[in-house]
Amino acid sequence: MPKHLVDFRLFQYALTSAEQGSFRQAAATLNVQQSTVSRGVRNLEHRVGAALFERDHSGIRPTPAGDQFLQEATLGFDHLKRALERAEALQRGDHGELTVGVSVPFAMLGTLFERFRAGHGGVSVEIVEGTSDGCRSLVQQRQVDVAFVARISGNGTPRSLYLRDERMVLVVPKSHPLAGASRLRLEELCREQFILGASGVGPDLEQHLTKRMAKLGVQPRVQLHRVGLCNLINMVALGFGVTIVIGPPPRVAADDVVLVPLAGRNIVPVSAVWMESNPNPALKGLLDIVREQASVS
């Protein structure tokens, strides 16, 4: 065995002996035989090539070389202890990184991530917005650990868990003739200009409108914009058209718009998708919360 490869227990025997002032007390502290400690220290001295302790009837004390060696060894053990604690925390999912894809509004996931961050505050979370198809592809490519998407379709879908349905809500200007309705049917919206986000849930909503209105013999007028939800709502207020949102109303919704729920099966199924082969411990911590919330939804 090369000289520099040393059993770490020998360092522990030497450090504890220096702290206790005797091999006997060190053995009691470590719950091993005194002979094990004394042999271990002699083995370490042999490998170091210097006497680490002076021994006499009154006990032991470090030699000058031993004192220097033990100071350096203590620093090394502190680093090793932190490294072991860090590795253990990463394995538990208490630290690390988690990348999350979303096609649904992140506000819908607020309670879930509040719980996750409360229990895993050392995990750095990055949010990546995209379409449902795009987020699912990122999961398969392992560019994101988990995604929350508006639908599940196609072959090769990663592992998925249905969470809940979210009702579609129409956003119209306050001056719109339908602004006073309590609920609306798609039949009443055939002539409307829809403006939707090109990312996020927008393409899913466009597909839904196209499919549902085809049964009415109508091709919906849809324009996709590469803007966020807040700007879409402001565009509605300025008369660009109407839009559709899901989940809780945006907190920053413009004062000049009205939100009207859509009646019937105008809902969006929300699911979580991930790869079972993903070894990220932080992912397991989040999925435990996701499964718990799904079971009570």
Image: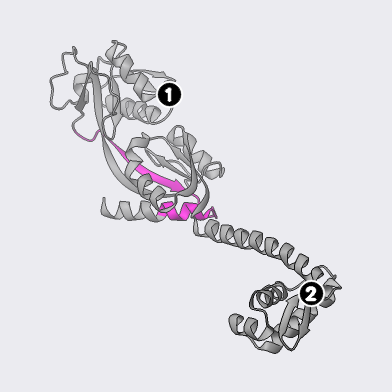
**Which stretch appears magenta?**
264-287
The secondary structure type at the circle numbered 1 is: loop
Q: Check disc 1 and give the amino acid type.
A: Ala
Closer to us: 293 or 38: 38
Tell which circle, 2 or 1, labels the residue nearer the N-terminal end.
Answer: 2
Could you say where residue 224 lies in the image, as x and y percent from the top left?
Answer: 40, 19
Could you say where residue 236 lies in the image, as x and y percent from the top left?
Answer: 29, 16
Task: Check the image and report above or below for 55 versus 145.
Answer: below
Q: Which residue sits furthest front?
A: 58
Could you say where residue 184 lies in the image, as x and y percent from the top left?
Answer: 17, 25
Mark 2 nearby-residue class (10 Å; few <14, some 14–19, many ≥20) = many
Label 1 belongs to which residue? Answer: 198
Mark 1 nearby-residue class (10 Å; few <14, some 14–19, many ≥20) = some
Spatial CA span between label 2 and label 1:
71 Å
Task: Check the image and report above or below for 93 versus 222.
Answer: below
The secondary structure type at the circle numbered 2 is: loop
Mark 2 vs mark 1: give the one in front. 2
Mark count: 2
As drawn, is 292 to the left or to the right of 8?
A: left
Q: Are marks 2 and 1 in contact (CB under 8 Å)?
A: no
Could you say where residue 291 lies in the image, as x and y percent from the top left?
Answer: 36, 54
Residue ID at (26%, 30%)? 249
Residue ID at (65%, 75%)? 16
Is residue 275 shown in magenta? yes
Closer to us: 22 or 4: 22
Q: Is residue 233 visible from the viewing direction of this image?
A: yes
As drawn, is 92 to the left or to the right of 200?
A: right
Is residue 285 shown in magenta? yes
Label 2 belongs to which residue? Answer: 52
